[in-house]
Amino acid sequence: MLSLVLVLWGIGTPSFWRDESVSVMAATMSFDELWRLLDDIDAVHALYYLLLRPFAAFGGEFAVRLPSALAVAGATFGIAAIGRKLATPQVGLLAGLVYAVLPMISRYGQEARSYALVSAVAVAATWVLLGERRSRYAGYGLLVALLGWFHLYALLLLPAHAVVVLRRRGETVPWLASLAGAGVLLAPLAVIASGQREEQLFWLKVPGIPELGQLGVDIAGGDAAWASPLLPALFLALLIALVLVGIWHGTRSRRRGVLTAQGHREDAGAGGHREGAGAAGHREDLTAGGHREDAGAGEGPGRPSLVGVAVPWAVLPVVLSLLISQIHPVYSPRYVLFAVPGLALLAGAGLAALRRTPATWAVLAVLVAFSVSAHLAVRGPANRPDDLRTLAAELSAQERPGDAVLYVPERFRLFVVVYGEPYRRLSALGPGSDRVWLVSRRIRGPEWEEDPRLKELKRDFRKAGQTRISGAVRITLYTRRIPSDA
């Protein structure tokens, strides 16, 4: 509930930006128009656009972003359940709280894109994978297919799942069978998406260390939050420290559990067991609240530990995405949002490792305090790549009857018309146009020469107004040249 309240706080304040605009337009198109869009460039988001349609019918930022907010709440609940299953109720509670207060989670919980839903499905698939019954693999396969239909790159979660499965006796074959079934369901999307890759991912570059660092910046609130870098830096440093403590404590607990199990086996082999020592060990394993304090408490023969699940989950999708991107760029911090639950689980284990309840809650309170400035920044229009709402308001104030519009490239029409009233009043550029609004990215010299529409605009019109910039989207007024201008 806390995560839902936190995400709903200010959810309607930031303007839609380019990607969200496409989501809203796709969710409100006729099915014929949507089919043409999907067939052209956007098949990978087909399922999300269909899911969004009933919400988009209500209009407004709140309704369209609501699925993402609900997905964050679901993911938070799932993380708490996984922490409880693999360790203790306290670890689960703390991991869920850490996830809820991460500024990056609020950022994408307030966005009309699929990334929060991808994370929720990743959590659900991991929870099902950690079950005991073989029959669970049917549901797991369906969740993997759903994960891929929401975002194909989220299938980079599967190597992390492989690490878990390979440690469990007799699980490999049913796991592979479930993946084969998921592959059949995903095959049509994969074929179509492979032909749209250049249209979808032309903006991605080969990542390096700075791009990896951007993931840390985004976790702590994004570029706007780091305008005053002290608190986000402290937040990120404390989060990393808790993750490292969680790994250390979980690894130590696991080793201690292995040694204890060996000791029990040796005692049993001698014909008995030491009752007094066992009772003392039991007392040591209880916290003040009556729960096991070890992050590796769920470890046993064939059973995974929290560290064994969370470390691959947090690390492998990011590393593999970076490695693949050296050949075919696929890395973006938001594309690996589904790996963040692994970090939350480890940080929750780190908090629980403090052992003293007052210390645990005090450190969590400090983490929350360090995040406040980032949460405020996330809810401001400057945090989004574009402020399309303000751009539309400025255009509405300056346009005149008879003005025309030119979109360069044409897909920029999808980027801006989510706030469509001023754009709907503009006509297409034609012979009778005297004033033209150019909606475009930054126009460089060679682009004027290659696009015939720009060549015509440059020949017959002159720049007459100051460019209004919102992120990558610009609007510029041009008026028709008179003979003295030639």
Image (cartoon, rainbow, N blue to C red):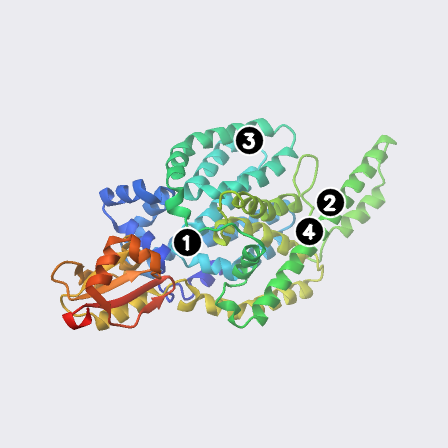
- The residue indicated by pointer 3 is 175
Amino acid found under the numbered disc labelled 2: Arg
Asked if 128 appears above or below 472 in the picture, the reply is above
Crowding at dot 1, Cα within 10 Å, few <14 / some 14-19 / many 20+, comes out as many
- The residue indicated by pointer 4 is 247
Foreground tag (4 vs 2): 4
Q: Tell me the distance, in whole angstroms, between the alpha carbons under discs 4 and 2.
A: 10 Å
Q: Quadrant of the C terminus?
A: bottom left
- The residue indicated by pointer 2 is 254
Amino acid found under the numbered disc labelled 4: Ile
Q: 29 or 19: which is nearer to us? A: 19
**Residue 41 at what x, y percent from top left?**
33, 44
Nearest to N terminus: mark 1 or mark 4: 1
For residue 173, what is the image quadrant? top right
Dot 1 lies on which element?
helix
Amino acid found under the numbered disc labelled 3: Trp
408 relative to 111 in the view: left or right: left
**Residue 182 at what x, y percent from top left?**
46, 32
Nearest to N terminus: mark 4 or mark 3: 3
- The residue indicated by pointer 1 is 68
Q: Which residue appears at 17% of the width and 59% of the height?
A: 429
Whether tag 1 and tag 4 are in contact, CB under 8 A, the answer is: no
Q: 233 or 466: which is nearer to us? A: 466
Q: 128 or 173: which is nearer to us? A: 173
